[in-house]
């Protein structure tokens, strides 16, 4: 039977994190892009020299590239944690199903002795 959305939210049987990470990543990239644009234009808006404007552009590019790499790594790490959780849960589920079978094998081995 299909659970309602409220039941899935309340019981924590379904993890929404892996689906949300992609949206959080996109929001982070947008914020990073806006921050980079701010630094690029603020270099020229100070009214100082042309080199400070170029420095602002360079700083904006460095912020976007380095921040993008770090942000991507952070989001990938989060997804890896969710995958570890899913795989461990699956192993526990398989182990719980295997226990009765192992007990039955031990009983059969004792009977054969």
Image (spheres, rainbow, N blue to C red):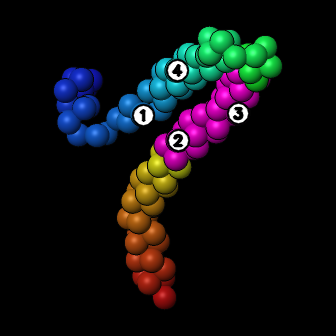
Q: Are marks 1 and 2 in contact (CB under 8 Å)?
A: yes
Residue neighbourhood size for the residue with mark 3, other residues' Cα within 10 Å, grouped as few (<14), some (14–19), many (≥20) = few
Res 36 quadrant in image: top right
- Judge from the rendering whether residue 76 lies leftward or rightward of residue 49; answer left or right: left
User: Which residue is rendered at x = 52% and y = 41% of the image?
Assistant: 78
In the displayed structure, 107 sits above or below 73; it is below
Q: CA distance from mark 4 to mark 1?
A: 20 Å
Quarter of the rendering occupied by the N terminus: top left
Residue neighbourhood size for the residue with mark 1, other residues' Cα within 10 Å, grouped as few (<14), some (14–19), many (≥20) = few
Q: Main secondary structure of the magenta part?
A: helix
Q: Which residue is mark 4?
A: 31
Q: Label 3's element?
A: helix
Q: Which residue is mark 3?
A: 66
Q: Which residues are magenta?
A: 56-83
Inspect the magenta stretch and tell me whether residue 57 lies in it. yes
Q: Is residue 30 visible?
A: yes
Q: CA distance from mark 2 to mark 4?
A: 19 Å
Residue 18, position as x, y percentages in the image: 47, 32
User: Which residue is rendered at x = 20% and y = 36% of the image?
Assistant: 10
Q: Label 1's element?
A: helix
- Of tags 4 and 1, which is closer to the observer? 4
Q: Which residue is mark 2?
A: 78
State which tag comes first along the sequence, 1 or 2. Answer: 1
Res 77 quadrant in image: top right
In this orientation, which residue lies closer to the viewer: 65 or 76?
Answer: 65
Q: CA distance from mark 1 to mark 2?
A: 9 Å
Q: CA distance from mark 3 to mark 4?
A: 14 Å
Q: Label 2's element?
A: helix
Q: Residue 17 shows which numbered tag?
A: 1
State which tag comes first along the sequence, 3 or 4. Answer: 4
Q: Total number of numbered labels?
A: 4
């Amino acid at each position: 039977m299909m659970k309602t959305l409220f039941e899935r939210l309340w019981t924590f049987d379904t993890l929404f994190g892996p689906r949300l990470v992609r949206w959080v990543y996109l929001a982070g990239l947008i914020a990073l892009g806006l921050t980079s644009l701010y630094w690029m234009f603020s270099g020229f808006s100070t009214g100082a020299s042309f080199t400070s404007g170029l420095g602002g552009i360079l700083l904006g590019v460095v912020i976007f590239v380095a921040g993008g790499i770090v942000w991507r790594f952070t989001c990938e790490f989060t997804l890896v944690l969710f995958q570890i959780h899913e795989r461990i849960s699956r192993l526990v589920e398989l182990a719980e199903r295997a226990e009765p079978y192992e007990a039955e094998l031990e009983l059969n081995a004792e009977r054969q002795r």
